[in-house]
Amino acid sequence: MSRALKNRLRATALWFATFLLMIVISVPGLWVVLSGFRPNREILAKPPVWIPEKLTLNNFAKIFGFGQDQVAIPVLEYFRNSLVIATTSTLIALIIGMAGGYAFARFRFRFKNTWFLGLMLFRTVPGIALSLPVFMLWSRLGIIDTKLGLIIVYVSLNVPFTIWLIDGFFRQIPGSLSEAAQVDGCTRWQAFWRIEFPLARSGIAAAGVFAFLTSWNEFALASQLTRSTDSKTLPVGLMDFTAQFTIDWAGMSAMAFIIIVPALILTFIVQKHLIAGLTFGGVKG
Amino acid sequence: MAGIKLENVTKAYGKLEVVHGIDLEIAHNEFVVLVGPSGCGKSTTLRMIAGLEEITGGVVRIGDRVVNELPPRKRNISMVFQNYALYPHMNVRDNLGFGLKIAGHTAAVIEERVAEAADILGLSELLDRIPAELSGGQRQRVAMGRAIVRHPDAFLFDEPLSNLDAKLRVQMRAEIKKLHAKVATTVVYVTHDQVEAMTLADRIVVMKDGYIEQIGTPMDVFNHPVSTFVASFIGSPPMNLIPATISDGTVRFTDGTALPVPNRLKDLVREGQEVVFGIRADDITPIGHGIHEARETTEIELEVDLAELLGSETLIYSRLAGQEVQCKMFDPRDLTPGERLTFRLSLDKAHIFDAASLQSVRAH
Ligand SMILES: Nc1ncnc2c1ncn2[C@@H]1O[C@H](COP(=O)(O)OP(=O)(O)O)[C@@H](O)[C@H]1O
Ligand SMILES: [Mg+2]
């Protein structure tokens, strides 16, 4: 066998293996998305129907309360709650992350390493382990079943991560850039916004996306801390489709689709930053 | 019109004092180089002038203003950093114009001044590139351009050439000198490279461990070092320094070799004094291979350990009283290791330092 042929075969095999792996990874997601567009009957059919016979928007009409058979699930409220909670907690986590990350990257202060280690250790505690204490605390404070309650939880979940990621970015930017800007006439604050912030933008965007996705997708804590349409988020709302004896897979899938889409769109929009952010290649040169 | 004046300036990080009361007066348009080994406090001093480092004690004046409490932006200085510190997300034009923009100049003024600076530094073709697309030398020029567009009272340079390769460094060194001739301004330039200091400076400030060791013109510092430190730091190869004792009016080395005490130093040494004898390689040359007509000389026989041909001269490594000494042979001929030669030693160029204080006996 010639060398060229061998290489060619190897490349093809590699490509094929990757393709298979991708299929395995995407099947559940695809299945959910497809199921959102097919009737419950077809979803539950045995043997399974792999290729849908016809796609329908009925499930969406149903959960939004149009059409003949309505499902009394306040999807719009859940969507709004999710959006408010995820956006607010992300913004706060980013602001704290920028302030903290900048401080860790630029300033010397006492117990700096201890602080940093503490933050990272906090990340290792599984959120669910805190759910009972948080529940009790929140009910004493009267913020059970409020958006505020969840926002506080998500901010504290995300802050260690945003600080860590953003710190890494500011660390890469030489301190002399800010100094040069100050000599050039900037205040420290102007130097930050005109020089350091634009250079760390990729990292900040990446941190923002991760914080947003964490809050947007989180289920375990939200299911404990929320009750009503005032504060339930989309993932928690999914459980509304399980009645005592039946599960409305079609409605659930349609709603899952609604959860997935904004996350995907967001990821696509900041894709460029995300890649730069994750490969840490932001500010070379 | 602005000179710079430091009065008893100190800097401490917490309890650790790293600059110990520096006095320095820099005249308007003077080019002053702070030179010294790494860690001696050059950058710290420069950064105190720039306002990037708080001044622990003393007074810094730029022009007739005390600037101790002023932030960098109010000191009307500009600075070139070792890593250039160009703004990576802006093209050359915006890098140059950034300071003017912050100062609120109109677009027309900015364009004119940027064009002027670009012209002086040969950057006109590069205005639309970003720093990542420039070579080291070009980045260096942009950094200098950014310094000159604002017409500041003083330029501060912190080791601006140390990231360049040797050839480019020599070239940029010349450009900095030319730039200073074109744009007459007060310059404070920091380097650990004594060649840079010698070639660029109107006046050299030699620093050591947070103190100023000597201030003087390059000639002064080279010909009249106040201490063994300056003697070995300035000049290449470093001055030969050999311990000796003053005995019977001679400089006697540990192996018994004795040289006459140079006439001009006779009254400055006392019998029995422990000293260090200093002589540059240029001033010990095999007879017939020297450069200058020395007025006061003595002869000494030395063995060649190693000879390095440098082109128009040869550097000879030899030993005197167990110490390595380097000598020069101008208009060289071939030498073999082990060969013994008679050298002419120019006593009028020799130095004597006190062995205890390591200060020149001429000082005080
Ligand atoms: N931020 C700092 N904290 C503590 N010590 C410092 C700091 N910056 C510099 N130093 C110390 O001050 C001394 C002088 O440093 P520097 O001025 O940078 O030296 P040079 O520029 O001459 O190489 C060094 O010993 C250095 O370790
Ligand atoms: Mg330095």
Image: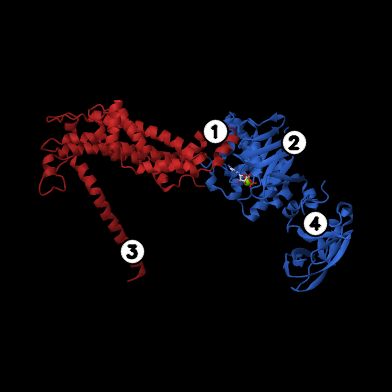
Chain colours: A red, B blue
Which residue is denoted by mark 1 in the rendering? A188
Whole-Å distance between the Cαs marked 1 and 4?
53 Å
Whole-Å distance between the Cαs marked 4 and 2?
40 Å
Residue B160 x/y as whole percent = 63, 46
Q: Chain of mark 2?
A: B
Q: Secondary structure at mark 2?
A: loop
Instruction: In the rendered view, tell whether residue B140 sits above or below residue B148.
Output: below
Q: Is residue A165 visible?
A: no
Which residue is denoted by mark 2 in the rendering? B28
Which residue is denoted by mark 3 in the rendering? A8
Quick check: marks 2 and 3 in contact, CB under 8 Å? no
Q: Chain of mark 4?
A: B
Within the image, what quadrant is residue B266 found in? bottom right
Asked if residue A118 lies left or right of residue B136, the reply is left
Residue B65 x/y as whole percent = 70, 29
Within the image, what quadrant is residue B352 found in? bottom right
In front: mark 4 or mark 2?
4
- Depth order, front residue of B206/B262: B262
The residue under the point 64% across, 53% down is B168
